[in-house]
Image (cartoon, rainbow, N blue to C red):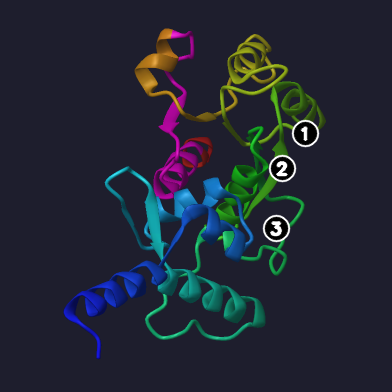
């Protein structure tokens, strides 16, 4: 016969089995640890923090996300009660924009964030083609090949960073008016103090995806 202590112990074990760490969730879903953190922030995954500040994610929300992704890829409906499939899990191959579509160039040395932004933009219905670059030098080469309508960029990158890239663009008459959206771990007052032009939109990482869409949409509308 179990004592009350045994029952409490069983409940604690059951409670622990209902949660996983962000690292475990990332391995199960097949994405980066950072991407899981962003999904927790935007509510795609349900989690709580321990007294030590560590996130614990509900296994139930991980399973709902996985089931939603499997159904989306198979073309079926999302399971009842499941959250919307997070942006980084939505396929983009089904609807490629035409060659004449407007374009956005995304610059970041984090490949998982590049992919997250790319897939998020594909859901906006703005007919935007997306190109990517891993640092400022690569971005300048991409811009030389074809000028984008909007540039989204990090600031801290290897090689030529975002500050140097933006100075180069603003110093060239052909690209001086290129609309810019910066997504940085630093806040706007800090980056402005470091020499970033005041007309550049600044979002703080992890960027709220709704705010990113609003910034890009506003810059595209200003060009119309």
Q: Which residue is mark 3?
A: 97
Query: Is residue 125 shown to the viewer in this render?
Result: no
Residue 197 lies in the magenta stretch = yes
Query: Is residue 68 shown to the viewer in this render?
Result: yes
- Helix, strand or loop for disc 1: loop
Neighbor class of circle 2 (other Cα within 10 Å; few <14, some 14-19, many 20+) is: some
Residue sitting nearer the eye, 167 or 9: 9
Q: In 3D space, how far apart are the residues under numbered discs 3 and 1 (Cα atoms)?
A: 16 Å
Residue sitting nearer the eye, 125 or 33: 33
Q: Earlier in the sequence, mark 2 or mark 1?
A: 2
- Quadrant containing the N terminus is bottom left
Mark whose residue sits in front, 2 or 1: 2
| Quadrant assignment, res 102 | top right
Residue 74 lies in the magenta stretch = no
**In the rendering, at what x and y percent does residue 130 appear?**
68, 47
Q: Which residue is mark 1?
A: 146
Q: Earlier in the sequence, mark 2 or mark 3?
A: 3
Q: In 3D space, how far apart are the residues under numbered discs 2 and 3 (Cα atoms)?
A: 12 Å
Residue sitting nearer the eye, 111 or 34: 34
Q: Earlier in the sequence, mark 3 or mark 1?
A: 3
Neighbor class of circle 1 (other Cα within 10 Å; few <14, some 14-19, many 20+) is: few
């Amino acid at each position: 016969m179990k004592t009350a202590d045994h029952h409490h112990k069983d409940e604690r074990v059951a409670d622990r089995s209902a949660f996983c760490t962000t690292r475990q969730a990332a391995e199960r879903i097949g994405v980066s640890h950072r991407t899981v953190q962003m999904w927790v922030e935007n509510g795609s995954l349900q989690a709580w923090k321990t007294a030590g500040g560590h996130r614990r994610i509900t296994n139930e929300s991980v399973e709902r996300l996985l089931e939603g992704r499997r159904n989306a890829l198979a073309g079926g409906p999302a399971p009842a009660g499941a959250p919307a499939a997070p942006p980084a899990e939505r396929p983009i191959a089904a609807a490629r924009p035409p060659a004449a579509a407007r374009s956005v160039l995304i610059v970041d040395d984090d490949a998982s964030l590049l992919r997250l932004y790319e897939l998020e933009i594909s859901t906006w219905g703005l007919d935007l083609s997306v190109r990517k670059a891993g640092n400022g030098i690569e971005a300048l080469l991409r811009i030389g090949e074809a000028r984008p309508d909007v540039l989204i960029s990090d600031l801290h990158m290897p090689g030529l960073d975002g500050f140097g890239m933006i100075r180069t663009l603003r110093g060239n008459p052909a690209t001086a008016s290129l609309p810019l959206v910066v997504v940085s771990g630093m806040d706007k007052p800090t980056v402005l103090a470091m020499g970033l032009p005041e007309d550049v939109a600044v979002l703080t990482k992890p960027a709220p995806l709704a705010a990113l869409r609003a910034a890009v949409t506003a810059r595209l509308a200003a060009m119309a």
